[in-house]
Image (tube, grey):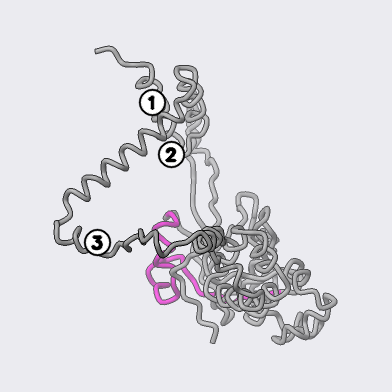
């Protein structure tokens, strides 16, 4: 059976649509180009096919709908006024004028003050949704990234950061952010942009991979193996941090990565941490013989502010105060992964 040109073009075009849905844009573009060479109006053919399929599905649903329900729906339709004697030329003009009135959109009737209240509530519930809302239109973009929004975020974030006693004294750190913003000339966006902070609604993950050489022998090829493991850090506003080093993937660990499950993993510990004003994070844990100290630095990852923790140093301190440093040659930075299911206790 001979296939028409339109049918061949549609088949190739649909392959492009399938590739695009899978994220293979390069393959999708090649299929689209081939389809256009077969038939220049293949896009119109594809839209028509989708419309026909939708109409067929709609007709099938109507055919399956019980007759009494269709009669009830039909009774809801408003009857048209066909009384020509009542409708004169003046009334007809009025109706035409009413038909030209634009619909009343919600954003047109809400003032900026009301929208700011909505944005403030949204930031408290889900800060990520605030960024999505900002991308919907120019007006909301200005409000979502205005002074009120930055002040709200600052008051949600900074009072729950755990600073060292020396940093508190030297920088006069207080939970009152109206006082802290004075150091940035009362500029809330500037403070939020320059002052690092830790994130609690998720986990910092470091994936470490390296090649290890096997035992020496007399064979021609030296055996090697790929070693991969993960480091996890979950900070809490009470000054504790849950640490774990394991070969298990994040999709296995993250749902169970809670302090009450610390006994589930041999290498999991609960340590203490504190933050310096410049974004340095110090993590400390103790055993009978040693104190373990890890120093990290908060940094941004592209447009994602304060999304990464870079290694500075890692060492132990014995009872005599002597330090022993660990090599960080194979270690990788920690990147933050937000987890919606995590509940944060700010008390």
Residue at 38 percent across and 21 percent down: it is 6
SS for dot 3: helix
Question: Which numbered mark, 1 or 2, is in the foreground of this view?
Answer: 1
85 horizontally vs 25: left or right: left
Question: Which numbered mark, 3 or 1, is in the foreground of this view?
Answer: 3
> Closer to the camera, 206 or 156?
156
Query: Mark on residue 188?
Result: none
> Closer to the camera, 144 or 288?
144
Residue at 65 percent across and 58 percent down: it is 304
Disc 3: CA contacts within 10 A as few (<14), some (14-19) or many (>=20): few
- Determine the CA span between mark 1 and mark 2: 19 Å
The numbered mark, 1 or 2, whose residue comes first in the sequence reads: 1
Residue 65: horizontal and vertical position, in percent? 17, 54
> Closer to the camera, 264 or 136?
136
Residue 270: horizontal and vertical position, in percent? 51, 74
The N terminus: image quadrant: top left
Which residue corresponds to mark 2? 22
Q: Which residues, given as a range, are shown in magenta?
A: 249-275
Which residue corresponds to mark 1? 10
132 horizontally vs 80: left or right: right
On whether residue 31 falls in the magenta region, the answer is no
The answer to whether the residue labelled 1 contacts the one labelled 2, judged by CB atoms less than 8 Å apart, is no
26 is higher (above) or lower (below) than 168: above
SS for dot 2: loop
On whether residue 257 falls in the magenta region, the answer is yes
């Amino acid at each position: 059976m001979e296939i028409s040109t339109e049918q061949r073009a549609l088949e190739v075009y649909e392959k492009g649509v399938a590739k695009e849905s899978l994220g293979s844009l390069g393959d999708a573009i090649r299929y689209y180009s081939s389809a256009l060479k077969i038939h220049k109006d293949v896009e119109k053919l594809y839209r028509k096919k989708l419309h026909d399929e939708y109409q067929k599905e709609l007709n099938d649903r109507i055919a399956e709908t019980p007759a009494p329900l269709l009669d009830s729906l039909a009774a809801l339709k408003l009857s048209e006024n066909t009384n020509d004697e009542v409708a004169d030329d003046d009334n007809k003009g009025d109706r035409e004028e009413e038909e030209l009135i634009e619909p009343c959109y919600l954003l047109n009737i809400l003032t900026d003050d009301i929208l700011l209240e909505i944005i403030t509530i949204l930031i408290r519930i889900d800060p990520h949704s605030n960024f999505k809302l900002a991308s919907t239109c120019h007006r909301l973009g200005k409000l979502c990234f205005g002074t009120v929004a930055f002040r709200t975020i600052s008051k949600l974030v900074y009072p729950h950061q755990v600073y060292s006693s020396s940093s508190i004294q030297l920088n006069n750190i207080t939970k009152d952010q109206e006082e802290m913003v004075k150091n940035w000339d009362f500029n809330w966006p500037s403070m939020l942009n320059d002052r690092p902070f830790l994130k609690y609604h998720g986990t910092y993950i470091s994936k470490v991979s390296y090649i290890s050489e096997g035992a020496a022998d007399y064979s021609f090829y030296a055996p090697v193996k790929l070693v991969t493991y993960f480091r996890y850090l979950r900070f809490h506003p009470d000054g504790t941090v849950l640490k774990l080093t394991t070969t298990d993937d994040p999709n296995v660990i993250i749902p169970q990565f809670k302090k009450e499950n610390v006994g589930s993993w041999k290498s999991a510990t609960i340590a203490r941490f504190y933050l310096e004003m410049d974004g340095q994070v110090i993590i400390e844990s103790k055993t009978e013989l040693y104190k373990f100290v890890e120093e990290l630095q908060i940094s941004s990852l592209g447009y994602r502010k304060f999304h990464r923790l870079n290694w500075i140093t890692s060492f132990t301190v014995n009872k005599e105060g002597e330090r022993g440093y660990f090599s960080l040659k194979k270690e990788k930075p920690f990147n933050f992964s937000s987890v919606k299911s995590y509940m944060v206790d700010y008390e």
